[in-house]
Structure formats: C-alpha cells, structure tokens
Image (cartoon, rainbow, N blue to C red):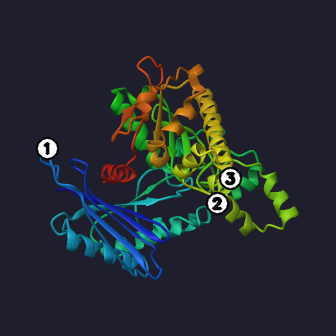
C-alpha cells in the first residue's frame, strides 16, 4: 500500500493525515493543539478499512488525551506515538512521501515543489509576507524531515493555484517600482481548496473542466471566492495577505485604506494596533461580538440587531463579489460552496444567491435546506447555472499533488 503523510503545521498546532493514495482512503488523521502551552490537546482518529469495497459497519475510532507538548519536534514524537499505540502502525503503512501545506509561496512557487535546503530558505524568506503562517509551516517541515529522513518531502503552496492570475488581476495600482521592490501584489490563498472543489464539481457533473466557468466560495472562519475559467484561477478575493476580500470571522476583508490613516491620526493606533484590529477584532467578531456564523444566525433569528447587521454585511459582500466575478468570466456555469460555513449554512447560500436570477441561478430551497453528506446539487432542475455544495478536502488534494510530482 502506498501511503502519503500530509502535514499541516500551524503556529500552535499540528494537523496530520495518512492517505492511501492508490484508492484515496484516509487511514488515520490527527490534531495536536495548543503546542507550547501548559496543556496540549491530542486527538487521533483511525478510519475503518474500506479498501475491499465491502460495506463497513465499523465507526471511526477516536482517541483523545491532554498533556504538555513543548514544540513541533515534540509534536512529531507525539504523532508517532499515536500511530504506534492506536494504528495504523507506520511500519506496516510506511509513508512513501510527506506532503506539507505551506501558506505563502510568493511568485516563486507555482507548483508542488520537492523540499530541499534551498526551498526551506526561500519559505523562510517569504515569511515576511505571511509572518503568522510560513514560520509555522517551516517548523513542521524541519521536524518532519528530521523524522522521515529517507522519503521525499513536498511543499504544496496555498498561493500556487492563483499563479495563473493575469497581470490585470494581480496588480495593485500603486507606485510600480515600490510594489516590485517589496513584492506587493495579489497572491490569493485557499488555492488548494479552490482547485480541489473546482475539479470535484466538474467530475460530479460529468463535464470537461476545461470548458467550465466556475465560482468557488470557500467560506470558513477565513473566506475567499475565486473565479475559475477552464480550470485556471483568473480572479480571487484574497490579496497580498489573507485579509483582503470577503467579510470573515475576525478579519475585515475589503476596507478603504484611508480608514487606517484616519485611525492612526485620530485614535493613535500604531501599526501593530491596526494589525490586531483588522485580523482579530473585525469581521463578524467586530460587528456582532461573535465570530462563529452559527452564533450570528442564532442571534439573527432571535432578533438581535447587531447579529442581523453582521449577517447582512456578510451577504452584501458575497453578492458584490459574485456579480463582479460573473462579469469578469462573461457568465458562469457552476457555483460551488465549501468549507464550514459554505457547506453547512443554508441561509448563507440562499441569501448569497437570491439576487443572481439575472445570471440564470435558481435555488431549490428544499435541496438547499437538506442536510446531507457529500457533494450535492442545490439548484433547480431548470437553473441554467449548477449550484453545488462540495465538501473540501485539502489533505487529499495535497496528497494528490505530492503523488503527481513524484
């Protein structure tokens, strides 16, 4: 069995998945949270074996524990312990490769890349563009390469899918020399998810990916939308950083840059103050004091004015981007919703699509409200645009790209 170990290393977490790439079954997955704190939370889940194609009644087996985990090296040791204690034993399913999620690849990395010492140096250098993400991603790579010495390691970049953006889409209208010197341009993020969802949508519909004009809304705590023409990203809402674009859980999305100058001059906000404001105290959190869409919807249903306004602002931004991107594509064939909010919040999907009848969008409200697992259609049979809910699987996409490279 050819297995690929997928690593998603965050600043205080380590998420992992062992995937049998031959049949794309996830064998096990785990999450180590609060690394470096007094007590870390450890979860390891073993999936039932479905490789035979037989009906499997066995449920996932999950194991949870808490104990201190000092750093990412220690986290890898804990991960190995979990595999040894709960399975599958890595000696029986040795990874043929390790695939790593890396958030920012700048303009240098446009495809999955074999990790070398030079690549590690470039990931570290790009940390200036993603100071909250790239250092943690690199820590995971270093720790993994120390453990899995004899297998190839592959970096898969969130920004890579968006390297097909045309210059008109990725260029900001500021001083060109200054922008070039400091690499200021739109890079886009969530690319691994957008690629997986757009390809899955085409496969589900039995359509040629190369002929489709698609919008993919990745709506989680972080949120972005991408216009995809023939399988290529041509426009995306996130920019130099993951802050631009849609309203998010704690991030503002689009904002008049002069507002920051105003707050600096009038409220005495420093650069660091503004950074915290825009990334941690804005979005749904800033508008309603709650960052989870489930809480926003509950407040809206209860008549809470702040929650209602937060929801309305969120939907207004979704509709604005949908209309803009449909215009850029010259029409749209498929619209997909994914990630936590996109997959589970029927009210968000319904309201976001409510004004797109001019583009041929018709939502079947029964289909939209039904809670089902897996990819599904929520548009009517007469809608000229297919509207889908497509569960994302970034770990599987990383495993696929790692396998294809090797």
Q: Secondary structure at mark 2?
A: helix
Residue identified by numbered label 3: 287
Residue 131, horizontal then vertical, whole percent = 59, 67
Q: Residues within 10 Å of mark 3 (few under 14, many from 20)?
A: many
Residue 230, horizontal then vertical, whole percent = 46, 31
For the residues labelled 3 and 1, the Cα–Cα distance comes to 49 Å
Q: Secondary structure at mark 1?
A: loop
Residue 150, horizontal then vertical, whole percent = 27, 70
Mark 3 or 1: the one toward you: 3
Residue identified by numbered label 1: 53
Give the mark, 3 or 1, whose residue is nearer the N terminus: 1
Res. 381 mark: none
**Foreground residue, 154 or 205?**
205
Which residue is at 44% across, 49% downward?
192
In the picture as drawn, the residue positioned furthest to the front comes out as 302
Q: Is residue 369 visible?
A: yes
Residue identified by numbered label 2: 279
Which quadrant of the figure contains the N terminus? bottom left
For the residues labelled 2 and 3, the Cα–Cα distance comes to 13 Å
Q: Residues within 10 Å of mark 1 (few under 14, many from 20)?
A: few
**Foreground residue, 365 or 168?**
365
Which residue is at 41% across, 53% downward?
112
Which residue is at 72% across, 53% downward?
179
In the picture as drawn, the residue positioned furthest to the right comes out as 266
- In this rendering, is residue 30 above or below 143? above
Mark 2 or 3: the one toward you: 3
In the visual, does 286 lie left or right of 301? right
């Amino acid at each position: 069995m050819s297995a690929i170990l997928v690593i998603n290393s965050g600043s205080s977490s380590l998420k992992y998945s062992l995937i049998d790439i031959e049949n794309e079954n996830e064998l096990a997955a785990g999450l180590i949270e609060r690394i470096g704190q007094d007590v870390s939370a450890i979860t390891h889940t073993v999936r039932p074996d479905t490789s035979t194609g037989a009906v499997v009644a066995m449920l996932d087996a999950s194991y949870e524990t808490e104990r201190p985990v000092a750093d990412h090296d220690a986290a890898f040791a804990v991960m190995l312990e979990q595999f040894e204690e709960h399975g599958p034993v890595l000696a029986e399913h040795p990874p043929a490769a390790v695939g790593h999620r890396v958030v920012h690849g700048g303009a240098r990395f446009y495809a999955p890349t074999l990790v070398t010492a030079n690549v590690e140096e470039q990931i570290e250098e790009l940390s200036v563009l993603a100071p909250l993400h790239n250092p943690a991603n690199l820590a995971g790579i270093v720790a993994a390469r120390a453990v899995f010495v004899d297998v190839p390691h592959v970096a898969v970049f969130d920004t890579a899918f968006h390297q097909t953006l045309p210059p008109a889409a990725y260029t900001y209208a500021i001083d060109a020399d200054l922008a070039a010197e400091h690499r200021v341009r739109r890079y886009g993020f969530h690319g691994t998810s957008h690629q997986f969802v757009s390809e899955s949508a085409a496969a589900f519909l039995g359509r040629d990916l190369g002929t489709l004009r698609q919008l993919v809304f990745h709506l989680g705590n972080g949120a972005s939308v991408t216009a995809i023409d023939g399988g290529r990203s041509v426009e995306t809402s996130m920019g130099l950083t993951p802050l631009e674009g849609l309203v998010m859980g704690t991030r503002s999305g689009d904002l008049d840059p002069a507002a920051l100058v105003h707050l600096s001059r009038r409220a005495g906000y420093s650069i660091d103050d503004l950074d915290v404001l825009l990334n941690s105290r804005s979005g749904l959190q800033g508008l309603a004091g709650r960052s989870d869409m489930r809480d926003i919807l509950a407040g809206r249903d209860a008549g809470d004015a702040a929650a209602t306004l937060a929801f309305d602002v969120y939907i207004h931004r979704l509709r604005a981007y949908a209309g803009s991107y449909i215009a850029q594509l010259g029409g749209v064939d498929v619209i997909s919703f994914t990630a936590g909010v996109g997959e589970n919040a029927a009210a968000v999907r319904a309201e976001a699509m409510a004004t797109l009848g001019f583009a041929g969008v018709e939502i079947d409200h029964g289909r939209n409200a039904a809670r089902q697992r897996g990819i599904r259609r929520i548009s009517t049979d007469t809608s000229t645009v297919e509207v889908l809910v497509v569960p994302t699987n970034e770990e599987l996409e990383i495993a696929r790209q790692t396998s294809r490279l090797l």
